[in-house]
Image (spheres, rainbow, N blue to C red):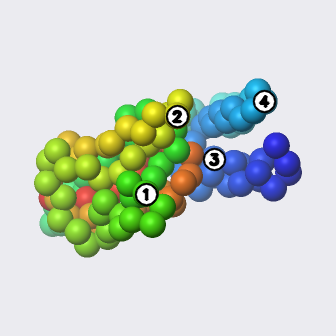
C-alpha cells in the first residue's frame, strides 16, 4: 500500500469514529487501530448518529441502517446504474438499500425499518466496518 492509501484509511478512522480498520490486498494485510487515551474513561464504541445530528426535543428519533458485515459499500447494483436509494427517498422494511461486497460476494443489504432517508453516511466503493452506520432515516 502506498502512503496516499494509508492516509485515506486513517481519514476513514477519524471521520467515522472507527477504532479499527483492516485491509487485505494481494497478500498484504494492514490493520490500523486507534485506542482511547489512557484514563479517559472512554471505551471504543460505534459513533452515535444522534449525537452528530442536531434535533429538536419534540422531533421523532432518527433511525440508522448499519453495516451487518465488513466489506466494500456500493450504492447501486452496477457502476452505471442508479443508486438503490437517495437522500429524501422513502424506504420500506425489506427494501434493498445497498450492496456490501465481502470476499468477492455481493450481499444485498435490506432495510430493517421503514422511513425516509435523511443522510447517506458512506461514499460509494468505500470500506465499511461491522455495525458502522450507513444511512440515517426518519420514521
N-terminal of the two: label 2 or label 4?
4
Q: Is residue 79 visible?
A: yes
N-terminal of the two: label 3 or label 4?
3
N-terminal of the two: label 2 or label 3?
3
Q: Residue furthest bottom?
A: 88
Label 4, residues with CA under 10 Å away: few <14, some 14-19, many ≥20? few
N-terminal of the two: label 1 or label 3?
3
- Where residue 72 sits: x, y (%)? 52, 44
The structure residue drawn at horizontal position 25% and vertical position 59%, both measured from the top left corner, is: 137
Q: Nearer the viewer, mark 1 or mark 3?
A: 1
Q: How many marks?
A: 4
Name the foreground residue: 82 vs 13: 82
Q: Which residue is mark 1?
A: 78
CA distance separating discs 1 and 2: 15 Å
User: Which label belongs to residue 28?
Assistant: 4
Q: Is residue 130 visible?
A: no
Name the foreground residue: 72 vs 19: 72
Q: Which residue is mark 3?
A: 13
Q: Nearer the viewer, mark 3 or mark 4?
A: 4
Amino acid at each position: 500500500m502506498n502512503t496516499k492509501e494509508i492516509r485515506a484509511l486513517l481519514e476513514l478512522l477519524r471521520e467515522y469514529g472507527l477504532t479499527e480498520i483492516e485491509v487485505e490486498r494481494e497478500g498484504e494485510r494492514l490493520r490500523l487501530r486507534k485506542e482511547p487515551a489512557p484514563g479517559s474513561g472512554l471505551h471504543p464504541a460505534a459513533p452515535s448518529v444522534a449525537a452528530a445530528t442536531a434535533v429538536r426535543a419534540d422531533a421523532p428519533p432518527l433511525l440508522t441502517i448499519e453495516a451487518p458485515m465488513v466489506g466494500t459499500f456500493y450504492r447501486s447494483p452496477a457502476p452505471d446504474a442508479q443508486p438503490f436509494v437517495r437522500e429524501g427517498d422513502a424506504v420500506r422494511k425489506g427494501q434493498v438499500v445497498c450492496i456490501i461486497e465481502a470476499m468477492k460476494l455481493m450481499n444485498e443489504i435490506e432495510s430493517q425499518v421503514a422511513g425516509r432517508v435523511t443522510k447517506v453516511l458512506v461514499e460509494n466503493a468505500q470500506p465499511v466496518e461491522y455495525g458502522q452506520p450507513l444511512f440515517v432515516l426518519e420514521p
